[in-house]
Image (cartoon, rainbow, N blue to C red):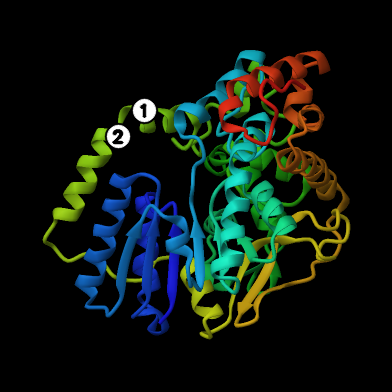
Amino acid sequence: MAKVTFIGAGSLGFTRGLVRDILTFPAMRDAEIALMDVNPQRLDFAQRAAEKIIAQGNYPATVTATTDRAAALDGADAVLCTILAGGVQVWRHDIEIPKAFGVDTNVGDTRGPSGIFRALRTIPVMVEICRDMERLCPRAILLNYTNPMAMLCRAMQRTSTIQVTGLCHSVQGTAGMLATWIGAPMAEIDYVCAGINHQAWYLHFLWKGQDAYPLIREAITSRPDVYNEEQVRNEMFLALDYYVTESSGHNSEYNPWFRKRPDLIEQYCTHGTGWNPGHYAYILNEYLRREDVWRQETEAWLAKDEPISLARGHEYAASIINAYLGGEPYAFNGNVPNTGLITNLPAGACVEVPVVVNRRGFNCIHVGALPPQLAALNNLSVAVEEMAVDAALTGDARLLYQAICYDPLTSAVLSLAEIKEMVDAMLQQNAAYLPQFTVGARA
């Protein structure tokens, strides 16, 4: 009987969908689903949702729910992590303080000063999870969904023997978008995608074995609806010749080209049809103003008598776990250490490359060198992330400041003295949540 553990099970939509998917595999029909969250109410919702799925599917599976992380991890075969360290009342300052200094971000959970401070709070918790796993379930795989993906995975892969990979929806999501733009069924599309999380590149994008990039370029340049859907990423493609993963909202933050002046934000980051409500203001509103509505909607879903769909969804964590337990090998793009996989990115850095998982674990595919114009942007992001991870693990406030000095957007907007002032303000705001830093640390 397999044991699958959810750390941060209160992320109810994710937990509910993945429990459904896991139970569709014969090897996991009788699994123990171990749910862990620090929020008892959200944990209760997750447990009741899992029990409802098990009952409707008549599965011989069981559910346990606990606020004790060690109990949840003990004997696990696979662990899924979707935590938020510090909560939204802390996270909001990651966005608001930089904005007060002129660094205007959109999502703020992956890179830049906002993503780095999120990493500083989260890395100690993730490392503790790995330490618990080394003691309680050393052969288990850890699938991370928490952002900032690359920095968290790098910290865990650097400090632990646990097999860790990070999963992100942007690779297959963007591939589906590009296929739609050129009228191609996804079943006829093949691609090779590699780089770093949220900044990986489709090195090959083929339709029926033929290069589809000319069709993509034609769609972007001749159809206003296509161009307007992803203005930032389309401009990057027209300049760099390869398409990048993750949304324009995210990617507008990861370079110096689109958010350094209000007129550029107005031109590229405001009116495109692809600017969905996944941005900071929407998320903050959801967390701060809709908690009661969320509870009501959750209770209503749990109380429904109608049958729910038990069909497997498109989330691929369940397929990864099934393959690791001895099922059919499964290919996906994962975040793994760079053991010569991408030859012009630093050794050991967390890269996003094709991976095949089987009973041996994660078997990573060699990619080779990225085109130089892509490696240039990736290397800048990696350099910042490496310094930030070092700072998180050592509590070195000076190195933290130096990491943010090289962030592309921050350095396009602020002077070195202004960056120092901003970092000091963020350290002060986060002092209670950064145990690795000396109280009152300054850059």
Please identify the quadrant where the C terminus is shown.
top right
Q: What amino acid is at disc 2?
A: Glu
Disc 1 secondary structure class = helix
What residue is drawn where x is 11% and y is 61%? 305
Foreground pick, 348 / 261: 348
- Residue in view at x 70 percent, y 19 percent: 424
Q: Residue at x 49, y 42 (%)?
A: 84
Q: Find the distance from the CA under tag 1 to the CA under tag 2.
A: 7 Å
Q: Nearer the viewer, residue 74 or 401?
A: 74
Quarter assignment of residue 206: bottom right
Label count reads 2
Q: Is residue 325 left or right of residue 149?
A: left
Q: Dots 1 and 2: beta carbons under 8 Å? A: yes
Residue highlighted by disc 2: 291
Q: Secondary structure at mark 2?
A: helix
Instruction: Say which residue appears at 60% left-offset and 47% top-offset.
Output: 246
**Residue 256 visible from this viewpoint:** no
Q: Around disc 1, counting alpha carbons within 10 Å, would you say few (fewer than 14), some (14 to 19), or many (20 or more)?
A: few
Q: Quadrant of residue 338?
A: bottom right
Location of residue 159 in the rendering, given as x and y in whole percent from the top left corner: 72, 56
- The spot of residue 94 in percent (x, y) is 58, 27
Label number found at residue 288? 1
Front residue of 88 and 191: 88
